[in-house]
Image: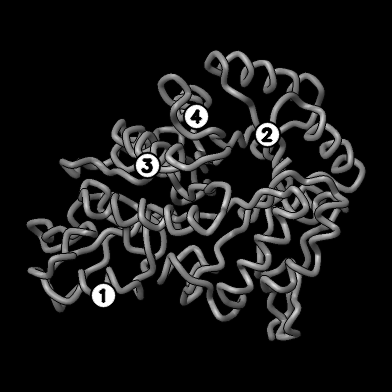
Amino acid sequence: MIYQVYPRSFADASGDGVGDLRGIISKLDYLEWLGVDAVWLSPFFPSPMADFGYDVSDYCDVDPLFGDLPDFDEMLEGMHRRGIRVIVDLVPNHTSSEHPWFKESRSSPVNPKRDWYIWRDPAPDGGPPNNWESIHGGGTCWEWDGRTGQYYLHTFQVEQPDLNWRKPEVREAIYDVMRFWLDRGVDGFRLDALSFCIKDDRFRDNPSNPDWRPGDPPWARQLRVYTDDRPEVLGIVGEMRAVTDAYAGDRALIGELYLPLKRLVAYYGVDLKGVHLPLNFGLLGLQEWKPSAIGQLIEQYETSLPEGAWPNWVLGNHDNPRIASRLGPAHARAAQMLLLTLRGTPTCYYGDEIGMRDVEVPPR
């Protein structure tokens, strides 16, 4: 069982109103009692917090809001002593606009790190280079930089410029990040927004989604055929797997992949040399919580798995309303039982095991 901990709101040891690593340390006996096999930690790296830590300004440190590296080491040792593995959230698609790499890239068109990110000249009319839209709120995912006279790409927020994974130096820099944490003793990575890492090298316009209707999410207006799940991503996955396989013991790669089943299972890789667990969000997207719908989902997923692939199920995470708020307390208990009895590895979002609900958080 994988247990997702969102450090910012899990447990506050310092009393400043924000969760921290020492707060997690204070709950290690609870995690052992609960029987979790691994803890997946959402980002705790230095960040301006434009996206609550998913805008990383330093991949190899701890934000002072959460503690420091000695706190991390103590937490890691405490979990390992209790037989709990530690999975670190790695954000490979983008950095913060405050990351030193991007500051260099933005400083000049001739800076050696310029093409570590995706820069393009304006369209003939002076506007964005193409029609690609942002996942966060819709609208163009190109931001004009007047100082250097080009647009940079941000699939998500404007503060999250996309890395250029076609650049070998970028790949090696991220693999060095992985080695930094593996050398420290972590047991693997959850790979954020994995399918977005490569974009079309011809920068072709995405087609419109003919099924989109007013009221649907703005980001769904397009079919992201040129910005998501490009064939080259699987090559990146294979290289990441080679990094973890170079270390002794069991190391896991878990992929965040909001994809149709046929594409999702492709990320197990040829001969199962991709990610160990491409996250299966079928239960999150289930429209009807009825036996027939659940049975159909299970059958479709199981029959889609490559031979030898190990299944997994996700019931909740930081991007979605809590299961007790979606279904109500009684159904949430039944759903949690379902999660824990289906074949495969379950992922539980912290607090769902006690039926926590969404609440309003008052302004500080």
The quadrant in which residue 137 appears is bottom left
Estimate the spatial distance between the alpha carbons at disc 1 and disc 2, rounded to whole Å. Answer: 39 Å
**Image disc number at residue 264:** 4
Q: Amino acid at mark 4?
A: Leu
Tag 3: amino acid: Gln
- Which label was assigned to residue 222? 3
Q: Secondary structure at mark 4?
A: helix
Residue 207 pos. (x, y %): 30, 37
Query: How far is disc 2 from disc 3 in space, using C-alphas?
Result: 28 Å
Which mark is nearer the camera, 3 or 1? 1
Asked if labels 4 and 1 touch by Cβ distance under 8 angstroms, the answer is no
Reading the image, the residue beneath label 2 is 313
Which label's residue is closer to the chain start, 2 or 4?
Answer: 4
Q: Residue at x 34, y 72 (%)?
A: 99
The CA span between labels 1 and 4 is 34 Å
Circles 2 and 4 in contact, beta carbons < 8 Å: no
Looking at the image, residue 25 sits to the left or right of residue 223; the answer is right
Marks 4/3: CA–CA distance: 19 Å
Is 171 positioned to the left or the right of 121 in the image?
A: right
Q: Which mark is residue 103?
A: 1
Colour logic: one colour
Where residue 206 sits in the image (x, y, percent)? 28, 40
Asked if the residues shown at circle 2 and circle 3 are in contact, with their CB atoms under 8 angstroms apart, the answer is: no
Question: Which numbered mark, 2 or 3, is in the foreground of this view?
Answer: 2
Question: Nearer the N terminus, badge 2 or badge 3?
Answer: 3
Q: Position of residue 90 (x, y in %)?
A: 48, 54
